[in-house]
């Protein structure tokens, strides 16, 4: 937190105007530094590692089937391993700081938004300070420069200062009303905000600001046990990242997915959760299959499988007369984002669980479009397109422990979700077009996803 507070002060000083050559530290506080061009010498001392750390994530890979339950042979590609993060730009002597005239043109909004979000995810504002004090930041309007500085201050705890800047910025040109509204939200304490999340198109900077607020609010709600709020918040956060105009933050998505799971285990995946559903009282001699059929009676458009009923009620397939079971009425579906290598299991528009996945290799690309879940096969045989069938359990069987077929307009395709015989390949482009999942993940998806559920594949 000390580094974040120092970073906030550093950004504020760097943003506060080109007429200030250097700043005087407040008595009793350590002097702050202004970020400079990376070509200058580093100041002595290594920054302390402080701040929010994203949970490590692993991208996924997929494999492609051939005929009936079939999929491609997996060939891990080490060239797809994630790149190491760049070193942060060093801080430098304020007396040698380059100054750039603030002009009315707008800097690249996507680049600024991505750098702002990166700073929050990594807990390190060095690159953000370097950007706004550099040549690119010189294209920012004075009002937007002050707005970004105030937003960062608010997010690291200097909310009163941010509120004062907000008052000064009202009515000024060069910053939008939506950005000022988000700054006002940042100036409030987490949990007290009336943050309105919209899936409507937003500017890149507005999206990044909203995502930072969502992450803070949702994390606080998770800590405080407000699980429905946390679940919806992390769902919105993940969707916002997948729809963003920058490259997906894979490790951050992994961390948010873990928090989503924690929240949803007591919300959408719990009998006591606050979600749309109906109650069915068990009769003598009934199984979960009977409960499913009775639940579907008179419920036009409802889609559910016995595995989902079992999961939300925690009955382990053992039910007794007079048990009261809750059955979700919101249709399950899956969104697959190829660039993020992520499978999102959803109820309606709300993300419930996320899994890293693999996708088709070059020349065997995973097809885009809308599909429906077809046959689901446990312990599948792999029917190769160019060789003999390979039985389940063989180390050469690329399908792993489950196969979930995709259909399109009622017609079988050679694509689907499946497990793997090489978990190290998950995260790479190694398949013939299918979506590869870790075996434990595909088994979970297999139980929750009913036949007929929609599968959307997006770039």
Image (cartoon, grey):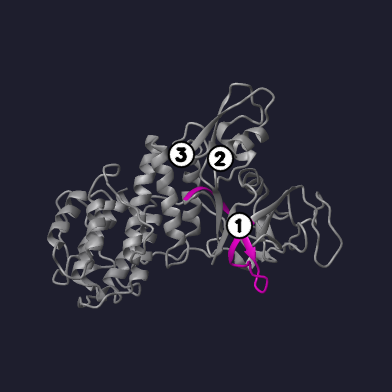
Numbered mark located on residue 298 in the image: 2
Left or right: residue 297 versus residue 231 is right
Pointer 3 residue: 275
Residues marked 3 and 1 touching at CB (< 8 Å): no
Q: Nearer the viewer, mark 3 or mark 1?
A: 3
Residue 365 shows up from this direction: yes
- The image shows residue 326 at horizontal and vertical percentages of 53, 33
Residue 14 counted in the magenta span? no
Label 2 and label 3: CA atoms lie apart by: 19 Å
- The image shows residue 339 at horizontal and vertical percentages of 53, 65
Q: Secondary structure at mark 3?
A: loop
Outermost residue toward the right in this view:
388
Residue 55 shows up from this direction: no
Q: Nearer the viewer, mark 2 or mark 1?
A: 2
Left or right: residue 49 versus residue 24 is right
The boundaries of the magenta stretch are 350-372
Q: Dot 2: few (<14), some (14–19), or many (≥20) neighbours within 10 Å?
A: few
Magenta: predominant secondary structure element? strand
Residue 370 counted in the magenta span? yes
Q: Please give the name of the residue rendered at 69% of the width and 63% of the height, measured from the top-left corner.
A: 76
Q: Secondary structure at mark 1?
A: loop
- Which image quarter: residue 44? bottom left
Q: Please give the name of the residue rendered at 68% of the width and 71% of the height, measured from the top-left corner.
A: 364
Left or right: residue 259 versus residue 147 is right
- The image shows residue 391 at horizontal and vertical percentages of 84, 52
Which numbered disc flags the more N-terminal residue, 3 or 1? 3
């Amino acid at each position: 937190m000390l580094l974040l507070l120092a970073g906030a002060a550093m950004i504020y000083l760097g943003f506060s105007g080109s007429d200030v050559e250097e700043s005087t530290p407040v008595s009793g506080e350590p002097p702050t530094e202004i970020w400079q061009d990376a070509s200058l010498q580093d100041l002595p001392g290594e920054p302390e590692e402080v701040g929010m750390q994203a949970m490590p994530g692993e991208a996924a890979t997929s494999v492609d089937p051939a005929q009936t339950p079939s999929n491609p042979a997996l060939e891990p590609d080490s060239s797809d391993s994630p790149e190491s993060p760049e070193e942060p730009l060093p801080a430098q002597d304020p007396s040698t700081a380059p100054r750039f005239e603030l002009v009315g043109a707008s800097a690249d909004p996507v680049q600024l938004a991505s750098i702002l979000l990166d700073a929050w995810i990594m807990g390190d504002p060095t690159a953000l300070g370097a950007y706004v004090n550099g040549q690119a930041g010189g294209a920012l309007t004075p009002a937007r420069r002050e707005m970004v500085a105030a937003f960062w201050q608010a997010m690291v705890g200097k909310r009163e200062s941010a509120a004062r800047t907000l008052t000064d910025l009202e009515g000024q040109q060069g910053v939008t009303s939506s950005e000022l509204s988000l700054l006002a939200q940042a100036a409030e304490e987490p949990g007290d905000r009336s943050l309105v999340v919209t899936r409507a198109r937003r500017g890149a900077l507005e999206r990044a600001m909203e995502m930072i607020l969502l992450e803070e609010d949702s994390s606080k709600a998770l800590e405080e046990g407000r699980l429905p709020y946390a679940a919806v918040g992390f769902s919105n956060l993940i969707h916002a990242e997948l729809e963003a105009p920058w490259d997906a933050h894979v490790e951050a998505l992994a961390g948010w997915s873990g928090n989503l799971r924690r929240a949803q285990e007591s919300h959408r995946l719990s009998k006591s959760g606050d979600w749309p559903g109906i109650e069915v009282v068990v009769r003598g001699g009934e199984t979960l299959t009977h409960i499913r059929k009775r639940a579907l009676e008179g419920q036009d458009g409802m889609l559910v499988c016995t595995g989902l009923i079992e999961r939300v009620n925690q009955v382990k397939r053992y039910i007794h007369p007079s048990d009261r079971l809750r059955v979700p009425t919101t249709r399950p579906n899956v969104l697959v984002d190829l660039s993020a290598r992520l499978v999102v299991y959803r109820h309606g528009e709300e993300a419930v669980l996320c899994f890293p996945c693999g996708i088709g290799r070059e020349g065997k690309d995973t097809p885009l479009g809308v599909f429906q879940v077809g046959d689901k096969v446990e312990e599948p045989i792999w029917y190769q397109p160019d060789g003999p069938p390979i039985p389940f359990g063989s180390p050469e069987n690329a399908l792993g422990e489950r196969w979930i077929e995709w259909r399109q307009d009622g017609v079988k395709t050679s694509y689907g979700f499946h497990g793997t015989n090489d978990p190290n390949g998950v995260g790479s482009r190694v398949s013939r077009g299918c979506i590869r999942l870790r075996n434990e993940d595909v088994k979970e998806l297999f139980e929750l996803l009913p036949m007929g559920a929609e599968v959307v594949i997006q770039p």
